[in-house]
Image (cartoon, rainbow, N blue to C red):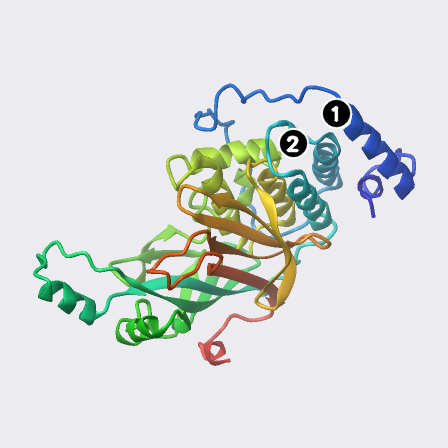
């Protein structure tokens, strides 16, 4: 189905177009665009310019999660997606590489063809998340060698040794967001080592492993409070927590749906964070999408916002993450030598996950350039009951 056919789902006064006709029209439009000077209103200001974002559109809080949206709303969103896809807005503003922008646009349109889960009272959206990330430890032998060399132990420099851990969590989101949410957090396990020293460090100082057990949390209204180090969680004086990016709210309707306005808001909430403005914007999108609770119209808007970020490209045409395959779209960050990627099935709009790749080797060469040093994959399904134990951690 092309964009015009999709638009006809919400408008009946649009004449039918054949795929060939759509392709000819798009080609003619692009030819005209290429003949003109691109419009780049912020080009003279530079990448480090601070912008005053448009205010958030605050609306009534949802009482039921992931319900459908009106035909009028669908028309507006689809029209925006079609317009930006055909008019090449991302390219005009120095956004993503054209191939990446096209893939993200396609994923955005496909997302709106898929209905979000419709939860009945008493049901839960179960979000299963697998995450692998880099950890580090130190070897006593290295400290002994430094001491033998006469180094001042108060200022000794000992290189860390790296290994990778895996976490599994399950979040159960009720139909009424004000009801109790549930979360299962499984104990971390060792995922990967990088040679004998790495194996030894993981055995002796498994950061993130020691003292951590499988746990089940009940979270009234999806709120929790963390006190002190580790995973000590209490329910007294709770604070919002599950949708951390952009604020402390699970109400996505506080975000603008227009991709350009959304990107401006992302720039605002991430100002000063990360190695660069554009890099941190893509990290924000990846972190938010991996939560698994973003409604379809906002997923589509985030894909479109990603298409406006300079430096975003297709990094792998067939990327498999946790058994699912899609297109990897990412951005090299030269300021810290890592690449942030999101992996999307452009045919369905499904967000498969996100990952980070090292652009340079580190750890004394143990971690080579091109190594995936972290990834998260999320899947969702509707279930009829909340968990009563942590038995799924052993599966």
Residue 28, image x, y percentages: 83, 29
Left or right, residue 105 beside residue 208: right
Q: Is residue 184 visible?
A: no
Identify the secondary structure beneath mark 2: helix
**Residue 200 locus on image (x, y percent):** 30, 75
Q: Residue at x 40, y 35 (%)?
A: 271
In the image, taking residue 147 as reference, residue 227 lies left or right, namely: right
* Relative image position of residue 283 (x, y in whole percent): 48, 46
Mark 2, Cα crowd under 10 Å, few <14 / some 14-19 / many 20+, is many
Tag on residue 91? Answer: 2
In front here: 308 or 153?
153
Find the distance from the CA under tag 1 to the CA under tag 2.
Answer: 10 Å
**Closest to the observer, 393 or 163:** 163
- Image quarter for residue 41? top right
Of residues 85 and 77, the one drawn nearer to the viewer in this rendering: 85
Question: For the point 57% across and 50% down, which residue is it?
Answer: 294
Q: Give residue 47's mark.
A: none
Of residues 157 and 205, the one nearer the viewer is: 157
Q: Quadrant of residue 94?
A: top right
Q: Secondary structure at mark 1?
A: helix
Residue at numbered disc 1? 33
Residue 338 location (% of width, % of height): 45, 49
The residue at 43%/28% (across/down) is 48
State whether residue 27 appears in this view: yes
Label 1 close to label 2 by CB (< 8 Å): yes
């Amino acid at each position: 189905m092309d964009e015009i056919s999709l638009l006809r789902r919400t408008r009946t006064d649009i004449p039918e177009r054949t795929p060939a006709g759509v392709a000819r029209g798009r080609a003619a439009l692009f030819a005209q665009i290429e003949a003109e000077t691109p419009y780049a209103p912020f080009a003279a200001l530079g990448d480090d310019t601070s912008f005053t974002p448009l205010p958030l559109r605050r609306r009534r809080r949802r009482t039921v999660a992931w319900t459908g949206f009106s035909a009028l709303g669908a028309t507006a969103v689809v029209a925006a997606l079609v317009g930006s896809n055909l008019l090449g807005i991302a390219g005009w503003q120095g956004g993503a590489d054209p191939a990446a922008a096209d893939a993200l646009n396609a994923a955005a349109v496909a997302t709106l063809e898929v209905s979000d889960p419709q939860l009945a009272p008493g049901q839960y959206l179960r979000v299963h998340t697998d995450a692998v990330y880099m950890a580090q430890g130190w070897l006593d032998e290295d400290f002994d060698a430094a001491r033998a060399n006469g180094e001042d132990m108060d200022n000794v420099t000992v290189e860390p040794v790296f290994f990778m851990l895996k976490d599994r969590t399950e979040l159960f989101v009720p139909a009424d967001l004000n009801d109790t949410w549930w979360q299962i957090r499984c104990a971390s396990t060792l995922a990967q080592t990088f040679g004998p020293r790495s194996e030894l460090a993981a055995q002796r100082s498994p950061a993130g492993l020691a003292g951590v057990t499988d746990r089940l949390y009940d979270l009234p209204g999806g709120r929790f409070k963390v006190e002190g180090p580790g995973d000590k969680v209490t329910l007294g004086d709770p604070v919002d927590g599950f949708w951390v990016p952009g604020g402390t709210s699970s109400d996505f309707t506080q975000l603008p749906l227009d991709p350009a306005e959304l990107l401006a808001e992302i720039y605002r909430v991430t100002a000063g964070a990360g190695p660069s403005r554009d890099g941190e914007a893509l990290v924000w999108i990846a972190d938010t999408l991996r939560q698994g609770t973003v409604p379809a119209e906002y997923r589509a808007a985030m894909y479109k916002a990603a298409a406006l970020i300079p430096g975003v490209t297709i990094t792998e045409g067939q990327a498999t993450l946790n058994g699912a395959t899609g297109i990897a779209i990412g951005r090299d960050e030269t300021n810290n030598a890592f690449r942030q990627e999101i992996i999307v099935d452009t045919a369905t709009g499904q967000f498969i996950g996100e990952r980070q790749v090292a652009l340079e080797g580190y750890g004394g060469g143990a971690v080579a350039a091109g190594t995936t040093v972290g990834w998260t994959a999320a899947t969702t399904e509707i279930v009829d009951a909340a968990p009563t134990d942590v038995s799924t951690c052993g599966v």
